């Protein structure tokens, strides 16, 4: 099924590829988006969906000194987030805080909480501890993984441990396992590697090439979803990784981004360079497991896993974020700086 966007739109001033759900904001459905301009002063936008769901409101607009290549909101403090940025010659990463009275200031400035300045290689992403309040961060560059301890009161971050991925691998991203806080998955050109943070050792890997993005299923243990350039989307059971348990065709061009819904089993978003966002329904359990799933919400099973394709974009879609507060809502960000917030409620059913 294909459809144009019926969602709510918002325009950033410059090109962009990073958007994040503000999970810690339990009063509003809100997102952070960062721009990627080579020559202009870049910006971070705090965007909130109006109570009636008909408008996206800019609650805060903040200058950021460099191009933003990665942005992650802190899961337990709505005013804190991380960015990976480029100066044009080198890459850096920092933890930022939105000023407390930002709504009352004419030109509020972001407060830099800490620099993650131990990297020599090109930084790819920063990951927050996946559940609850914790001072641990992981950063990944092309060659190394770093485990950090963040002290916001002292505005400092200290490296707790570091390990090299090896000379034959160039890391490109990663995800923190929400079911096992000691486990990190990291992507490289020919595999997904799994690391134990207690010993900083690689424990296993999946042989899969050209993975752009990965995401863990937050509702089911051992399930990882990979988005791959030309081969689409693969769903893996990490207890048996020789072959994926499901394959989805992805996009007509490269599949770039993937995001598992935080509440509904098997509901997956993907974004691609074909200027589309696809909504998939691909439960990983048996039919009996799916229909007996706990909670009041269930999904209508479909033979075709492609539930809907949102095609009203004019550029590649690199950014996807489900709302944690309202898990039937997602935000997408295309490279031309267009944010669209959609509801998937028409595809959900009540028991």
Image (tube, rainbow, N blue to C red):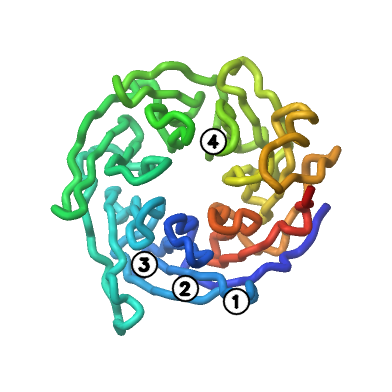
Q: Secondary structure at mark 3?
A: strand
Instruction: Name the foreground residue: 188 vs 129.
Output: 129
Q: CA distance from mark 2 to mark 3?
A: 9 Å
Mark 1 crowd level (few <14, some 14–19, many ≥20, 10 Å Cα): some
Left or right: where 215 falls relative to 194: right
Q: Secondary structure at mark 2?
A: loop
Q: CA distance from mark 1 to mark 2?
A: 18 Å
Whether 314 is drawn above or below 350: the answer is: below
Mark 3 crowd level (few <14, some 14–19, many ≥20, 10 Å Cα): many
Of the numbered discs 3 and 4, the one sitting upstream in the chain is: 3
Whether 304 is drawn above or below 167: the answer is: below
| Residue hosting label 1 | 55
Of the numbered discs 4 and 2, the one sitting upstream in the chain is: 2
Of the numbered discs 1 and 3, the one sitting upstream in the chain is: 3
Question: Which residue of the protein is positioned furthest toward the right in this rendering?
Answer: 303
Q: Secondary structure at mark 1?
A: loop
Q: Nearer the viewer, mark 3 or mark 4?
A: 4
| Residue hosting label 4 | 216
The residue lying at 23 percent from left, 45 percent from top is: 150
Q: CA distance from mark 3 to mark 4?
A: 30 Å
Mark 4 crowd level (few <14, some 14–19, many ≥20, 10 Å Cα): many
Whole-percent x and y of residue 171? 40, 32
Of the numbered discs 2 and 3, the one sitting upstream in the chain is: 2
Whole-percent x and y of residue 251? 70, 44
Whole-percent x and y of residue 247? 71, 30
Q: Are marks 4 and 2 in contact (CB under 8 Å)?
A: no
Q: Nearer the viewer, mark 4 or mark 2?
A: 4
| Residue hosting label 3 | 42
Q: Secondary structure at mark 4?
A: strand
User: Does residue 18 appear anywhere in the picture?
Assistant: no
What numbered label is drawn on residue 13? 2
């Amino acid at each position: 099924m294909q459809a144009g966007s019926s969602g709510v739109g918002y325009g950033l001033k410059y090109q962009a590829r990073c958007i994040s759900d503000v999970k810690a904001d339990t009063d509003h459905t809100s997102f952070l988006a960062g721009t990627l301009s080579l020559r202009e002063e870049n910006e971070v936008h705090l965007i909130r969906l109006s109570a009636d769901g008909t408008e996206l409101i800019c609650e805060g607009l903040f200058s950021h000194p460099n191009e933003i290549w990665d942005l992650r909101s802190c899961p337990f403090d709505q005013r804190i987030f991380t960015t990976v940025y480029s100066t044009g010659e080198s890459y850096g990463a920092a933890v930022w805080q939105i000023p407390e009275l930002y709504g009352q200031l004419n030109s509020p400035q972001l407060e830099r909480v800490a620099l993650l300045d131990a990297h020599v290689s090109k930084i790819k992403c920063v990951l927050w501890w996946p559940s609850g309040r914790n001072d641990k961060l992981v950063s990944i560059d092309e060659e190394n993984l770093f485990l950090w301890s963040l002290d916001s009161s002292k505005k400092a971050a200290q490296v707790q441990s570091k390990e090299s991925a090896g000379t034959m691998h160039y890391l490109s991203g990663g995800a923190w396992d929400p079911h096992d806080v000691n486990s990190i998955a990291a992507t490289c050109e020919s595999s997904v590697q799994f690391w134990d943070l207690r010993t900083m050792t690689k424990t296993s890997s999946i042989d899969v090439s050209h993975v752009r993005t990965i995401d863990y299923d937050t509702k089911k243990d051992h399930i990882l979803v990979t988005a791959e350039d030309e081969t689409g989307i693969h769903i893996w059971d990490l207890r048996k990784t020789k072959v994926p348990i499901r394959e989805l065709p992805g996009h007509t061009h490269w599949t770039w981004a993937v995001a598992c819904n935080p509440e509904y089993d098997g509901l997956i978003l993907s974004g691609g360079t074909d200027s589309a966002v696809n909504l998939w329904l691909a439960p990983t359990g048996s039919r009996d497991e799916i229909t007996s799933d706990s909670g009041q919400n269930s999904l209508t099973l479909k033979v075709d896993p492609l539930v809907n394709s949102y095609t009203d974009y004019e550029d590649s879609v690199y950014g996807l974020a489900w709302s944690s507060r309202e898990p039937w809502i997602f935000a997408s960000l295309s490279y031309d700086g267009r944010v669209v917030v959609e509801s998937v409620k028409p595809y959900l059913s009540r028991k």
